[in-house]
Image (cartoon, helix red, strand yellow):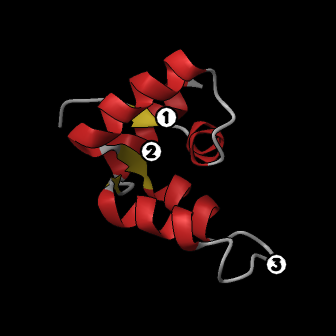
Amino acid sequence: MPGFLLDTNTIIDYLEGLLPVDMLDTLDEIINQKANISVISKLELLGWYQASPEDLIKPFAFVQDANVINLDDVVVSKTISLR
């Protein structure tokens, strides 16, 4: 699966328009190709404590359009070795 794996904080800043314009443009290109996120980012974005239904509209739409990468033993082992 080619492309970039987007971090939760980057996604939040992107959705809120908090990044510099050149970074927003770059992320637009990445996301238009199909964003890759981990299942952990999905949990973090949609498990937002005390979020109203309105607060979750953008994150939910983002996750629906993204390629969500699930955890398996290979991913877990690689993560452990990198840490």
Would you identify the image quadrant in which residue 50 lies?
Answer: bottom right
Quick check: 53 left or right of 71?
right
Task: Label 1: state its secondary structure.
Answer: helix
Relative vertical location of residue 55 with respect to residue 38 in this rendering, above or below: below
Q: Residue type at mark 1: give it.
A: Thr
Furthest residue toward left: 1
* Residue drawn at x 34%, y 40% as measured from the top left: 31
Relative vertical location of residue 42 with respect to residue 25 in this rendering, above or below: below
- Where in the figure is residue 27, as x and y percent of width and height? 42, 30
Q: Residue type at mark 2: give it.
A: Val
- Looking at the figure, which quarter contains the N terminus? top left
Mark 3 / mark 1, whichever is N-terminal: 3
- Looking at the figure, which quarter contains the C terminus? top right
The reply to whether discs 2 and 1 touch (Cβ–Cβ < 8 Å) is: yes
Along the line of sight, which residue is nearer the eye, 41 or 17?
17
Mark 3 / mark 2, whichever is N-terminal: 3
* Residue drawn at x 43%, y 66% as measured from the top left: 61
The reply to whether discs 3 and 1 touch (Cβ–Cβ < 8 Å) is: no
Q: Disc 3 vs disc 2: which is toward the camera?
A: 3
Q: Disc 3 designates what residue?
A: 50
Measured Cα–Cα span from mark 2 to mark 1: 5 Å
- Where in the figure is residue 60, as x and y percent of width and height? 49, 69
- Where in the figure is residue 46, as x and y percent of width and height? 59, 70
Other-residue count near label 3 (Cα within 10 Å), few / some / many at <14 / 14–19 / ≥20: few
Would you identify the image quadrant in which residue 78 lies?
Answer: top left
Any mark on residue 79, and which?
A: 1
Q: Residue type at mark 3: give it.
A: Gln
Q: Disc 2 designates what residue?
A: 76
